[in-house]
Amino acid sequence: RKFTNPDARQQEDLGRFLGRIDYLPLDAGRDAHWAELTQRLADAPDRVRVFYLATSPDLFGQIRAGCRNLKEIGVIQYD
């Protein structure tokens, strides 16, 4: 906040921006977590999706498999 002017317009813009962000912690080894992610994605099919995955390399295989399943059921697309 040191470098911004906290006027009402900025607060309104920030509120709209933050209202578009979802956070969902996910354990790649738990099917229930993938099911929750699937439901969230299905609830808003027209939203732009950006994923940030901070994980250890030993989970890459599980995450790849989970994303492949999400693609197969049609809630995400990737090449």
Image: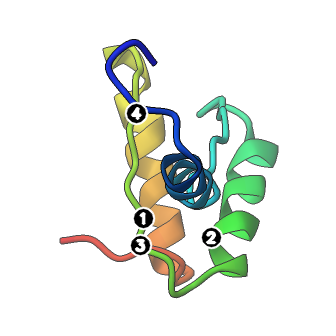
Residue type at numbered disc 2 = Leu
x%, y% of residue 20? Answer: 57, 61
* Mark 4 closeness class: few <14, some 14–19, many ≥20 residues within 10 Å: few
Task: Identify the residue under disc 3.
Answer: 48
Q: Residues within 10 Å of mark 2 (few under 14, many from 20)?
A: some
Residue at which label 2 appears: 41
Of labels 2 and 1, earlier in sequence is 2
Quarter the C terminus occupies: bottom left
Foreground mark, 1 or 4, reads: 1
Q: Are marks 1 and 3 in contact (CB under 8 Å)?
A: yes
Q: Which residue is drawn at 48% across and 48% down?
A: 10
Q: Distance between the residues labelled 2 and 1?
A: 9 Å
Identify the mark at residue 53; answer none if there is no mark: 4
Side of 36 where 19 appears, left or right: left
Q: How crowded is mark 3: few (under 14 residues within 10 Å), some or many (20 or more)?
A: few
Q: Which amino acid does label 4 sit on?
A: Leu
Give the alpha-carbon distance from disc 2 to disc 3, as whole Å: 10 Å
